[in-house]
Structure formats: structure tokens, C-alpha cells
Amino acid sequence: MCSFPGCGPDGWHSVTRNLRGGLKVRDLTLTIVTNRSLHAVLVDRPGPRLLELLAGALDGSGPAIAPVDARLPRPRLDALVEALAPDGVEGPDGETTLRSGQGKAVAEGTAVVVTTSGSTGVPKGVELSAAALMHSARASLARVGARPGERWLCCLPATYIAGLQVLVRSLVSDTDPVLADHADAQTVAASGCAHVSLVPTQLSRLLDVDIPTNPDIPAPLAGFRSVLLGGAAAAAGLLDAARAARVPVVTTYGMTETCGGCVYDGIPLDGVRVKIDDEDGRIWLAGPVLFSGYRGEPRAPGDQWLRTGDLGRKDSAGRLVVRGRADDVINTGGALVVPGEVAAVLQTCPGVRDVAVLSQPDPEWGERVVAVVVPADAADPPTLELLRLHVKERLPRYAAPSRVVMVDAVPMLSSGKHDLARLRRELLRREQSGAESVTY
């Protein structure tokens, strides 16, 4: 439950209007600030202070900010702050420690620096301008048809772009976000919000909640007008279940470098352009939502295409279909396998609750396809033969996994993505033992 003053009984907090002495955030004026200072803000949970600092960062009246998870292990936290090179660090208690002579100016117009590691584990500071953040927020509000006064529920970490953008949308639309520690059914149902951003794991858990027969107790997502879903690929079965429950799910694709989701249900937001490289199938993105550069690295030209790490294609209706990560492609005997496509197929196999697909070295084929499966019934898991047949009926034969490992749960990053780096380490550690079961 949220511990902020004024916190509601169900673990959520409503932020007060008119921040910083009566500022009407709908009328945020964009001011380009040069030689701007950067303050790292240690966040244990989002609160009114973070929203106040974000408003100042967007309108230029305050420093640029870099939200950092205060709950990180101390060595990693110290290393992250050192890499960000801020002029000051504000702790969860509101006290600011200045770092005289250690700060580095951010790119012109930068309002927020968000750290990201994706699935690689190597953190980077992504500099995002106020113009890019607000364009993204306005385009998102327009796409979902947000009406005046409709509020957003923030139940994702504000240190990630998805959670931060919920706050930006609230500031741009002059509404009070509801800040939740967790996306549990009671908190979501009691929030009174019309819009929310979730990751697939959160949506799955909310759909799995037993719906009471009492008509006075609504389903957790009843009444929401849009549920943005991103952070990781969503299984087709999850989307089907959500739509069958009349949950207005909108799938989003994007990354920190694009101020979060910039393609909704396969269609780019206003001003965003998408193209697919004819040679390697990479997705390229352009438009006013692009980042300014990486912290401490040479600045990228202002108007250019971003070459993503993802593979994609356009369907018959011209919508973007994300196939998976280019860096994860498995080369087995000269044939190229996209793990994301195999995982999407396996998600539809009977007896599979969750699945991740990765590679392992193979002396004969170079690499082999490995399926890490969370069975729907641990007492009756799907066999390797069943999984292979299911894949071969839908994809080329070489895409079928040659090994299956049963797990209780696939390890997750706090962003909602599978923690593939941890999973690879664990499988490698157990390879010598020949164990086919991994417990987390």
C-alpha cells in the first residue's frame, strides 16, 4: 500500500492539482534551455514530488531529471549515478546532494534522462527532449480518444519510460494520475481511472482473477476505456482472452529511444514513420518522438531514422508486425530462426502457460533451438514431441525446438520482459548436470 500522505485505502494516491504554486499543466510552455543541469531523482515509488519535478523539467523552470530506482543494490545504484553524471542527487526524502564539478550538461532541450538496458543488461542514459515527450503524450491521448478529465492509472515503475509517460500524459491533459504500488485487482478496480498502461504479466494476472457473482463488484478492468499493453510481446491467447472479456486492449510497440510506444495496434502515432529494411528486415523509426542522444556519447543528428534491434514486416493491411529481436536470431545449420516467432507459436500450444525461446551451442548445427516452458499443469507438462509437432505445422521444420526445459516461471525484468540473460546463465550453469528442470 502507498505510504504517501492522503493515500487511499486500496494502495493508491491521487496527486493534487496546480503544482508549483498554481501551474496549470495543460498550458505547459515549451522553453528550450541550453547548458541545462541534470538532477538524478532516487525513486522508491512515484509520488507528488516526482510529478512536480517532471512538470518543471518539461516547462523549463527546473532542471532536467533522471529518475533512478532507489531500491537498486547500492553498488549498482552508485555506478548508475556516476554514469549519469548529474549535478545533484535528490533522495526519496527530498534532500538534494550537489555534486560540485562532476555534472555534465545534457543535450539542448532535454527534459528527462531515462536509463535503459533492454534485454542486454548494459545500461544507457537516453536523453529525451520535452518536445518529444509531449508530442508522444498528445499523440497517444488522441489515438485512444481520451476525453477531458479522464484519468490515468500509473502502476508501472516511473523509472521506466512506460510509467513515466503515464505521468506526462496526465500533465499534458491536466488530470490527476492515480499512483499505485501494484496492479492488483482491488487497486485497479478502485482507481476510478479510464486509462492504464500494463505489461503482459499484469494483464494476465488481472484476467485470471475470479470474477465474483455479485454485480456490485466489478471486474478489475471494467470501466477502462483503453488498456495500453507493451514492454514485451503479448501472446495471441492473452489478447484473445482480453478481447473476449471486453477489455479495450491496445498493443504498443516502441522503446525508450522513442519516448515509449509509438506504434499502436500496428499503426504509427501521428508524425511517426516506420520502414522495414529490405536486406535484413530491421525496423526503422523516425519522427518527432525520437531521443536526442545517449548520455555521454556523441549527439545523434536531430532528424534521422533510428535503426532498431527488432525485425518486422508489414501485414496485408499495412500494419507493423514485430517478429522479434535481430540479435536473438538463432543460426542452426545455416537456417535462421527468430525466437520470438517460435515463442508466439508455442504460446498457442495446449499445456503451455508461458514460454521463452533461446539458443544453445551445438557441436553439429552450430546452435540449437531451446524452449523454456512454464506448463499449465506441472503434473502433466507438454512433451518435446508435442511442442515440435506444433511448431512444424506452423513454421519451417528447422524452427522446431530440439530441447525443452520445464520451469516454474520464466525470470522477468521489472520492465515486464523476460530476463533472457539470467535465463541463459542459469541454463549454462545447469548444462553439465543435465537437469531438465529449473526452479526460480
Image (tube, grey):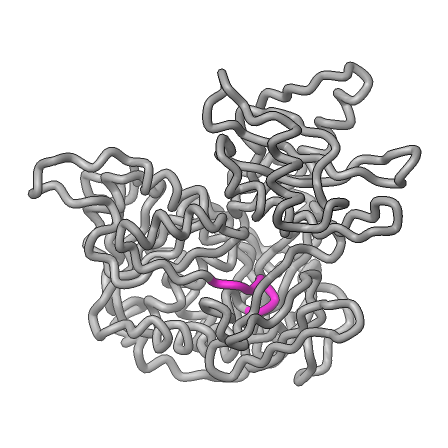
- Is 296 or 394 nearer to us in this picture? 394
Considering every residue shown, the one lying at the far right of the view is 363
Residue 113 is situated, as x and y percent measured from the top left of the image, at 58, 63
Q: Quadrant of residue 19?
A: bottom left
Q: Residue at x 54, y 23 (%)?
A: 381
> Toward which corner of the image does residue 79 lie, by quadrant?
top right
Q: Examine the rendering and report whether any part of residue 81 can be seen.
A: no
Is 40 left or right of 8, judged from the image as shown?
Answer: right
Q: Residue at x 54, y 50 (%)?
A: 68
Could you tell me how many numbered marks the image carries?
A: 0
Along the line of sight, the residue nearer the viewer: 409 or 241: 241
Above or below for 405 versus 155: above
Q: Position of residue 38 (x, y in %)?
A: 58, 64
Q: Residue at x 72, y 34 (%)?
A: 424
Check if residue 253 falls in the magenta segment: yes
Give residue 350's position: percent from left, percent from top: 49, 34
Q: Which residues are magenta?
A: 252-258
Q: Is residue 373 above or below residue 277?
A: above
Which quarter shows the N terminus?
top left
- Point 75% across, 39% down: residue: 369
Tell me if residue 138 can be seen: yes
358 part of magenta stretch: no
175 vs 300, left or right, is left
